[in-house]
Amino acid sequence: MSHTPHELAEEFPDQVDKIHELKTADAHFAKLMDDYHEVNRAVHRAETGVEPLEDMAESDLRKTRMVLKDEIASMLAKA
């Protein structure tokens, strides 16, 4: 398990400009990004022990993060 935050700029380093463009132009994309960052911060806090969670809850957060990241990736690919 990695304790490294999964920031979108690190996950999609070659698409940082496109991320910014979509965030300002598409309200749905902006909401996805906000949701991703919220869930990502919660996962990171759980992994580092700042706010420990039960294993199932932490696993559910990781799955939610993955779904959001997949949708973001899909929108980036179509843009």
Image (cartoon, rainbow, N blue to C red):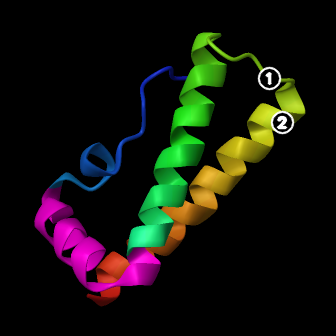
Range of magenta residues: 14-29
* Residue 59, quarter of picture: top right
On the picture, is 28 further left or further right than 44?
Answer: left
Q: Nearer the viewer, residue 69 or 42?
A: 42
| 78 over 16 or under it: above or below | below
Q: Residue at x 84, y 26 (%)?
A: 55
Q: Residue at x 74, y 16 (%)?
A: 52
| 14 over 4 or under it: above or below | below
Task: Say which mark, if any, is on residue 53.
Answer: 1
Classify 10 Å Cα crowding around label 1: few (below 14), some (14-19), many (20 and above).
some
Instruction: Tell whether label 1 touches label 2 (CB within 8 Å).
Output: yes
Number of marks in the rendered image: 2
Q: Nearer the viewer, residue 70 or 7?
A: 7
Pick out the residue farthest to the top.
49
On the picture, is 1 further left or further right than 30?
Answer: right
Q: Secondary structure at mark 1?
A: loop
Task: Say which mark, if any, is on residue 40.
Answer: none
Q: Amino acid at mark 2?
A: Ala
